[in-house]
Image (spheres, rainbow, N blue to C red):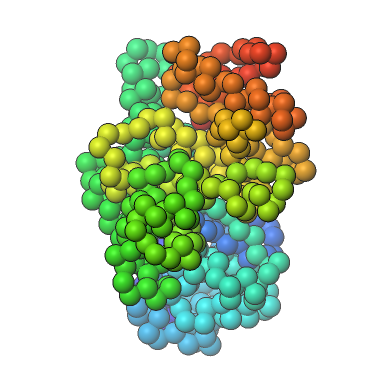
Amino acid sequence: MKNIILQQKAERDMLASKDYQPRRALADSTALLSSGLIKLITGPRRAGKSVFALQMLRGKNYAYLNFDDSSLLSRFEENSVMKALAEVYPGYEFLLLDEIQNLDGWDTWVTTLYRRGVNLLITGSNANLLSSEMATLLTGRYIETLMLPFSMKETLQYTRVNMQPLLPSEEAALSNAMEDYLKNGGYPEIVKTREIEQTYMGSLFDSIILKDVAKRHKIRKTAELYDLADYLITNYSNPLSFTGIAEDMGLGSVTTVKKFCKYLEEPYLFYFLPRFNRKLKEMKKADRKVYVVDTGFVLARSLELSANSGRQLENMVFMELLRRGFDIKKNELFYYHTANGKEVDFVTKKGAKLDSLIQVSYEISKAQTRKRELDPLVIASDELKCNKLILVTWDTDEQVNYKGKDILIVSARNWFLK
């Protein structure tokens, strides 16, 4: 066992020595580490959870166990592991458990370690980490930090694109990089190797479907699961109903559609945004808008014949709102339909009050488009008593007073980067 842990220590030190892109998180790393609660880093596969943990622990005395290692799993015995850790990492302050969901009975062991006062950081497949067992055993004992693929700003920083261009060549490079992110997304491993984009994203999609969904939920016939996932990707940024999906796909069971959508939501592959309504019963009955965790999946799996920049930008804005801390499960993020059926893309909420109404449109050069996007904001502002009105576009910055309402029209560059 000691030899296995020594080998993992060498791998840990090699990984920790690399120069990674600093990751943005809602919680301050120092505050997280000072807490005695379990630090749970969740998010989709390959989004950088382990790297973020290593960044947090840089300069600290910490022990490391990687459960994506068959030799550790096959020989795991609690007492021998703890003895070897003490020998390899004398006096360690923190214990990082990577991909721990691969260990049978991991949740019980984690609970035991926590009761013993071990300061824990855990990363891994969220579909397993956020199981009912963990919720039951560790309620109130952990802090969750969501780690998503690179934001636009992180991508530009990582590829060293000047975000405050002075020269025409720098301006062109920034514009091209932003368009690239819009189309290809921000998975860390491919932002510098776009030539393997579709192969990588297709393989990652398969891993999520087969390992995080089909295997976890013991689904033998995966064809319907794949078809549903492809349907959702093709209809990203659109409102959908479970009944409508079942009818479009020729599935006889709405119950199956609901169940599979829930399964696909667990590993953060898809998000389902509710329509705001002050009556909870009405909100639950309304269609939900579907978003995908990264637009790179659209390129790899969508049945679209051509890219839709407007829907891509809307998906990007949604993901950025998640990065800024608006949580669907905490009823902080919605879309809205006005009384006359006009749609507002996003409603954000802070505490008991609505915070902002946000509309998204790739371009508003035509008067008809401008009116189509601004009218719902004005109507919704009156209905919801919310006056922070924003229209995110690709390249327009303007402060306007429209029908008596002050509206900020902001470019993607300024909204995402500033």
Q: Nearer the viewer, residue 79 or 208?
A: 208
Q: Nearer the viewer, residue 42 or 113?
A: 42
State the image quarter where residue 72 is shown.
bottom left
Which residue is most to the right? Answer: 352
Residue at horizontal 52 percent and vertical 40 percent from the top:
318
* Location of the C terminus (image quadrant): top right
Q: Position of residue 10 (x, y in %)?
A: 38, 66
Residue at horizontal 45 percent and vertical 41 percent from the top:
238
| In the image, residue 34 above or below residue 165 | below
Q: Position of residue 209 (x, y in %)?
A: 36, 63
| In the image, residue 115 above or below residue 399 | below
Tell me: 44 left or right of 207: right
Q: Specify whether residue 164 is in view.
A: no
Q: Position of residue 222 (x, y in %)?
A: 31, 68
* Location of the N terminus (image quadrant): bottom left
Residue at horizontal 44 percent and vertical 84 percent from the top:
76
Tell me: 382 left or right of 42: right
Q: Position of residue 293 (x, y in %)?
A: 44, 48
Q: How many marks?
A: 0
Tell me: 267 left or right of 379: left
Tell me: 332 left or right of 210: right
| In the image, residue 169 above or below residue 387 | above
Q: Nearer the viewer, residue 35 or 403?
A: 403
Q: Nearer the viewer, residue 308 or 367?
A: 367
